Image (tube, rainbow, N blue to C red):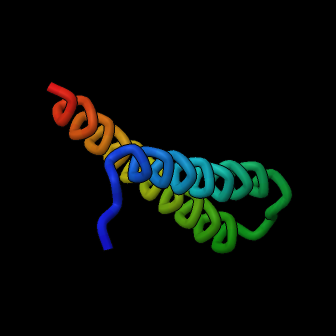
Amino acid sequence: MNVSAKLAVFMAAFFTLFCLGFAVNGFIALREITDAAEASASRGYAWFWTFLAAIGVVMGVVSWWIMREERK
């Protein structure tokens, strides 16, 4: 299956927003957690989703760059 560069940019943007939603939700939920071990685990999950969002941003930028270079 071939994915065009333009479609890859949109898919990366969707993936990034999806991951950021989970990350923000995880960081917001930390206020309500009283157990230190559970808070640490939740913080780890939130940072993991933030890392995945960063990967989505990188993939989007690379796809955009490829799309721009194809036009030349």
Q: Position of residue 33 (x, y in %)?
A: 80, 63
- Residue at 30% across / 66% down in the picture? 2
**Is residue 65 or residue 7 the one in the foreground?**
7
The quarter of the picture where the C terminus appears is top left
Does 59 sit above or below residue 42?
above
- Answer left or right for 11 relative to 60: right
Residue furthest toward the right?
32
Q: Residue furthest top?
A: 72
The image shows residue 46 at horizontal and vertical percentages of 58, 58
Q: Nearer the viewer, residue 3 or 16?
A: 3
23, 67: nearer the viewer: 67
Give the total of numbered labels.
Answer: 0
Looking at the picture, how far across and down is residue 27, in whole percent? Answer: 68, 51
Q: Position of residue 45 (x, y in %)?
A: 56, 66
The answer to whether 55 appears left or right of 67 in the picture is right
Residue shown at the point (49%, 47%) measured from the top left: 10
Which residue is rendered at x = 44% and y = 58% of the image? Answer: 52
Q: Please give the name of the residue rendered at 53% of the width and 59% of the height, measured from the top-left corner.
A: 49
In the picture, residue 37 is in which quadrant?
bottom right
In front: 16, or 3?
3
Quarter of the N terminus within the rendering: bottom left
Image height of 66 relative to 38, above or below: above
Q: Residue furthest front?
A: 71
Quarter holding residue 29:
bottom right
Q: Is residue 40 left or right of residue 11?
A: right
